[in-house]
Image: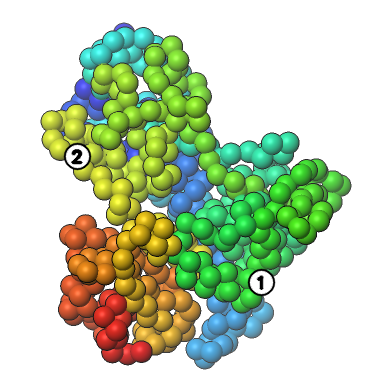
Amino acid sequence: MSKSFDVVVIGGGPGGYIAAIRAAQLGLATACIDEWTGADGKPALGGTCTNVGCIPSKALLQSSENYEHAAHAFAEHGVLVKGLSLDLVQMLKRKDKVVRQNNDGIVYLFKKNKVALFHGRASFAGGAPGAWQVKVTGGASEAITAQHVIIATGSTPRPLPGAAFDNKLVLDNAGALALPEVPRRLGVIGAGVIGLELGSVWRRLGAEVTMLEMLEAFLPAADEAVAKEAWKIFTREQRLNIVLGANIARVAPTRKGVTVEYSIKGGGEHKLECDRLIVSIGRVPNTQGLGAQAAGLKLDQRGFIEVDAECRTNLAGVWAIGDVVRGPMLAHKAEDEGVAVAERIAGRHGHVDFNTIPWVIYTAPEIAWVGRTEQQLRSEGVPFRTGQFPFMANGRARALGDTRGFVKFVAEATTDRVLGVHIIGPMASELISEAVVAMEFRASSEDIALICHAHPSLSEAMKEAALAVAQRSLNY
C-alpha cells in the first residue's frame, strides 16, 4: 500500500536532510529516502559530507595538526613532549566516532521534526504532477506517493580513465580517509581543495607527498595574492611537492604500489613511484539509477539535472538541489538551496545568493574567500581598490604562534562597496563569515573599518584590512 506525503526528499546529505527538516517545520508531511549504510549496518544519514567528506576529513585534519604541533611547535610554548608516537588506529577511531555522532544527530533531528525516514534506494516509478510515485528498494520495498519530490542525490568522485578506484592502491576520498597505515610515498592527482586537504593530512603524519596537477596555475579560483602565498607555504615550508601542468599518460599498479607516467609541457616525460595514489580530479552528479529517463526528467550533457533559478526541474512538482545541479559543489550551498526549495513549496519566498557563498580550504593555514577576485575584476574592467593586512602584525596571531598569511579586501573604487574578501591564515573559515554578512548587506569597506572589534582577536585583521583600503591601517 502506497504511503502519501506532501514532500519526499531523495538523498539524506546536507541539502537533502536540511530540506526535509525545513519542509516538516513548515507543516508539510515529509519523508526522506537515503541508502547510505554505516559500517555497523545501520542507516548513516549525512551523505558524502558527513560519512566520507567534510566531517571525517576535518577530524583527521585536526588530529594530524595536533600531532604536528606536538612534534614541532609545542616546545616554543614550553611544552616538552618526549617519546612522541602515532596511534593511527585511535586517530581513525576518533574520526569514525565524530562521523557517527553526526549521523545520530540527524536521526534525532528527523524524529524531533517528524520526518519519516526510508532506508534504501529511491527511483521514480511513474505518476504525474501532484502524485509522483517513488519506489524504495534495498531494505523492505516501499511505494511512496508525493505531491513534491526534491532530488538531492549529491555527487561521486570522478575516476581517472584507466585507473579505476579500488581503495587499496588507487584511492578516492573515502579510501584516502581510511588508510590503515601511513604510506611512505603518497601520490595525489589533483591539487584542488580535496587533494590539498588529504595530502596535508598524510604529509603531517609522515608521508612524502607528491601532487600532480593538470592545470598550469595553482589554485586559479582563488585570488592571485592568496594563491601565491599558499604556494610558498605549501611547497617551501610544508614540503609538499606540487607539479603543475602534469598530463597523466598512464597509471599502473606494481608489486610495491603504483606507477604514474606523466609529461610536462616543455619538460619531457616523467615517472612517479608511490605506495598509494589518491585521485582527486573533481566529482560527477549522482543521477544513476534514479529513473530520470523514464520519468522524463531533463539532464544536461554532463549528467546534471537541469533546473531554473529556483531549482525547479522540467517536471511540475519535482525539484533538484546541491551537487546534482548547476553551481558550486559545496555542502552549504546545498543546504541553502534545500531551505529555499522547502519554503517555495510552502508558498514562501526562498532565497539563495550565489554571489555570497563562501569557499574554504581547510589546510594549515586555512584559505577562505567570498565574492570576486582581483583578477576577475580586472578582466571585467571594474575599478577597484584593495587593502591588505598581515597576520604577523596581529597580536592574537602572535600569541597563537601562527602569523602566516593575511586578509585582503577588494572594494569598488567609487562606492567603496565590498566586492570580495580573501583570507589565508589562522581560522580563515570562521573569519570569512563577517565578510559574507558585510556583502549581503551591501557594506562598504569603511563600514567594517568603523566597527569595534575585540582586542586581541584575529578578527582585528579584518578591520585593519578594511582600513587599508583607504590606506589608513593602524597597526601596519
Can you give x and y, in whole percent of width and height, for residue 434 in the image? Answer: 26, 66
Could you classify mark 2 by the number of other residues whose Cα lies within 10 Å: few (under 14), some (14-19), or many (20 or more)? some
In the rendered structure, the answer to whether residue 51 lies left or right of residue 107 reads right
Q: Which residue type does callout 2 highlight?
A: Gly
> Looking at numbered disc 1 in the image, what kind of residue is underneath it?
Arg
Toward which corner of the image does residue 210 lie, by quadrant?
bottom right
The answer to which image quadrant residue 421 occupies is bottom left
Quadrant the N terminus occupies: top left
Residue 460 picture location, percent across and down: 29, 80
Q: Is residue 464 above or below residue 66?
A: below
Q: Is residue 231 visible?
A: yes
Q: Which quadrant holds the C terminus?
A: bottom left
Residue name at image x 38 percent, y 28 percent: 306
Q: With respect to residue 109, does 114 lie above or below? A: above
Q: Is residue 454 left or right of residue 210?
A: left
Query: CB under 8 Å between callouts 1 and 2?
Result: no
Residue occupying the point 34% across, 73% down: 386
**Closer to the camera in the image, 79 or 354:** 354
Q: Which residue is mark 2?
A: 350
> Residue 88 versus residue 465: which sits nearer the camera?
465
**Number of marks:** 2
The one of 263 and 321 positioned closer to us in this rendering = 263
Of helix, strand and loop, which one carries label 2?
loop
Expressed as whole percent of the image width and height from the top left, the position of residue 350 reads: 19, 39
Residue 239 got which mark?
1
Q: CA distance from mark 1 to mark 2?
A: 46 Å
Image-quadrant location for residue 32 = top left
